[in-house]
Amino acid sequence: MSFSMKEKIKQQEKLIIFTAPSGAGKTTIVRHLLKTLDYISFSTSATTRDKRPHETNGKDYYFISHEEFKQKIADDEFLEWEEVYENQFYGTLKKEVKRIWAEDKQVIFDIDVKGAESIKKAYPEKTLAVFVKPPSKEVLFDRLRKRKTETEASLKKRFARAERELAYEDKFDTVLLNDVLEEALEDAEEIVKNFVYGDEKMIDIA
Ligand code: ADP
Ligand code: 5GP
């Protein structure tokens, strides 16, 4: 008798969400998982915010205009979308999820807490929502500041929203503490592996 993990994974259509306040470490963790686990693929969101220097259009985000974003809403192209910050829109494209599942991979998301709730509601059985928790509010703010991607005004908006988002911790399936990065990365791998391989029956393809 022999088993194939690849065959088993092909049978699944799962969604793995990493959510948290800005600065908690979602992007760092998700990037690590994408390098480490070959059976997951990133759902690239659309956004109206400006591209940061190190970001790539079509990879980190689809950077689009407000007009294009509105058109996509009208055309029902989003699985969910949010005005995460004033006049800055972010949305998960249905076609990203379809594309990734068609490649026999599982979808990984880096989205805000409200978007995470919407996806969990749309696909309750298929979704694992992980809340990334910073050791404290102060550490979170410090990380955001040191990332040097935001202006003072943008930092203020992110701090204000983060205060509210920290209260969402209990609404998700798992809380992942991101204190010592190496430990958080290991824990994240375990969480994803358990969800994808976990409770399903192995498929005998011998
Ligand atoms: P998010 O995607 O949640 O906004 P990032 O992944 O961009 O957060 O992380 C915010 C900043 O904190 C980045 O500069 C990142 O390198 C740093 N960072 C992430 N995790 C840790 C950690 N465990 N310890 C120290 N710095 C961290
Ligand atoms: P950033 O501007 O730092 O890349 O992202 C700001 C916030 O928007 C983060 O919490 C990020 O996870 C969230 N975000 C990114 N893409 C999406 C999306 O498609 N939908 C929702 N709801 N939030 C998103």
Image: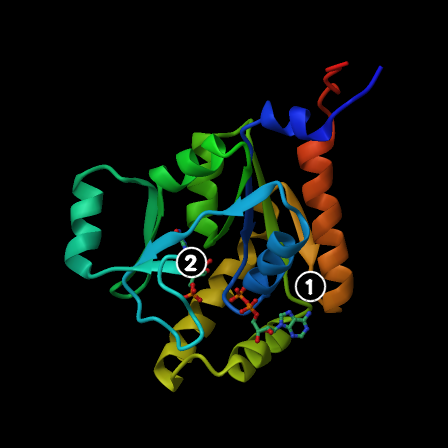
Residue 44 x %, y %: 41, 52
Q: Answer with the quadrant where ligand 2 appears in the image.
A: bottom left
Per the image, label 1 sits on a secondary structure element best described as loop
**Mark 1 sits near ligand 1, with its Cβ under 8 Å away:** yes
Q: Residue at x 68, y 43 (%)?
A: 192
Task: Find residue 20 and name its label.
Answer: none
Query: Could you tell me the amino acid type at mark 1?
Result: Asn
Kindly identify which residue carries mark 2.
59
In which quadrant of the rendered image does the C terminus lie? top right
Q: In this view, does 90 lie to the left or right of 131?
A: left
Q: Nearer the viewer, residue 32 or 84?
A: 32
Residue 63 x %, y %: 30, 62
* Category of crowding for the residue at label 1, using alpha-carbon neighbours closer than 10 angstroms: few (below 14), some (14–19), many (at least 20): many
Q: In this view, does 63 lie above or below 142?
A: above
In which quadrant of the rendered image does the N terminus lie? top right
Q: Which residue is drawn at 69% across and 63% down?
A: 178
Kindly identify which residue carries mark 1.
178
- Residue lying at the far front of the rendered structure: 206
Q: Are marks 1 and 2 in contact (CB under 8 Å)?
A: no
Query: Could you tell me the amino acid type at mark 2?
Result: Lys
